[in-house]
């Protein structure tokens, strides 16, 4: 059973940075695509970024140029570095994992079989 544990959320001000971590356990890390999604109150869950098992990355337009996703195979961890944060980035951030995967599936929440519990990010204006 694959388990994901997020950390790194918090309360920051506009323009600040945060790095979220997603620790993956329970199976061979290198065979999993890991994505980040977020959900703000009253809104649908939306795609943020993904790092595929084959090395590719994908970003939602909202985070391009500000967010960077990376994988550390030695630590079985995926990071989401978020810079120049805005109030509209406020949400619960979830990491999710799918076995292999790629292409257009990266941005689709229903393609991910495993989910973490979420970490709150709040950006004050």
Image (tube, rainbow, N blue to C red):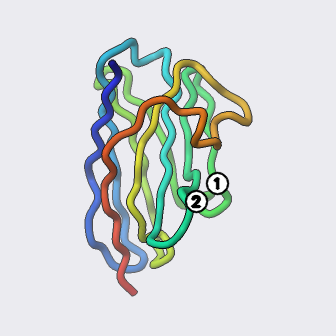
Residue 13 on image: x %, y %: 34, 79
Residue 55 on image: x %, y %: 58, 25
Classify residue 29 by image quadrant. top left
**Secondary structure found at label 2:** loop
25 displayed left or right of 48: left
Q: Looking at the picture, tell me which residue is in the foreground, 65 or 46.
A: 46
Q: Which residue: 37% across, 71% down? A: 16
Q: Looking at the picture, tell me which residue is in the foreground, 109 or 58.
A: 109
Q: Which residue: 34% across, 40% down? A: 116
Residue 41 on image: x %, y %: 44, 71
The mark found on residue 63 in the picture is 2
Q: Locate the C terminus and report the quarter of the image it occupies.
A: bottom left
Q: Looking at the picture, tell me which residue is in the foreground, 61 or 41.
A: 41
**Secondary structure found at label 1:** loop
Q: Which residue: 41% across, 79% down? A: 14
Q: Compared with residue 38, is residue 11 higher up or lower down, i.e. above or below?
A: below
Residue farthest along the right direction in this orientation? 104
Q: Residues within 10 Å of mark 1 (few under 14, many from 20)?
A: some
Q: Compared with residue 103, is residue 53 higher up or lower down, i.e. above or below?
A: above
Q: How crowded is mark 2: few (under 14 residues within 10 Å), some or many (20 or more)?
A: some
- Distance Cα–Cα, label 1 vs label 2: 6 Å
Residue farthest along the bottom direction in this orientation? 125
Q: Compared with residue 25, is residue 59 higher up or lower down, i.e. above or below?
A: below
Q: Which residue: 33% across, 18% down? A: 1
31 displayed left or right of 104: left
Q: Do the numbered discs 1 and 2 sit on residues whose CB atoms are within 8 Å?
A: yes
Residue at mark 1: 60
14 displayed left or right of 43: left
Residue farthest along the top direction in this orientation? 28
């Amino acid at each position: 059973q694959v388990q994901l544990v997020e950390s790194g959320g918090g309360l920051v001000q506009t323009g600040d940075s945060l790095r979220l971590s997603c620790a993956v356990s329970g199976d061979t890390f290198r065979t999993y695509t890991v994505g980040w999604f977020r959900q703000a109150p009253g809104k649908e869950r939306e795609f943020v970024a993904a790092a595929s098992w084959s090395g590719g990355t994908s970003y939602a337009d909202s985070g391009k140029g500000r967010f960077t996703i990376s994988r550390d195979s030695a630590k079985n961890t995926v990071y989401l570095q978020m810079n120049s944060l805005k109030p509209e980035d406020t949400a619960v951030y979830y990491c999710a994992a799918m076995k292999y995967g790629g292409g257009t599936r990266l941005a689709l929440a229903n393609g991910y079989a495993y989910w973490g519990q979420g970490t709150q990010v709040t950006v004050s204006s």
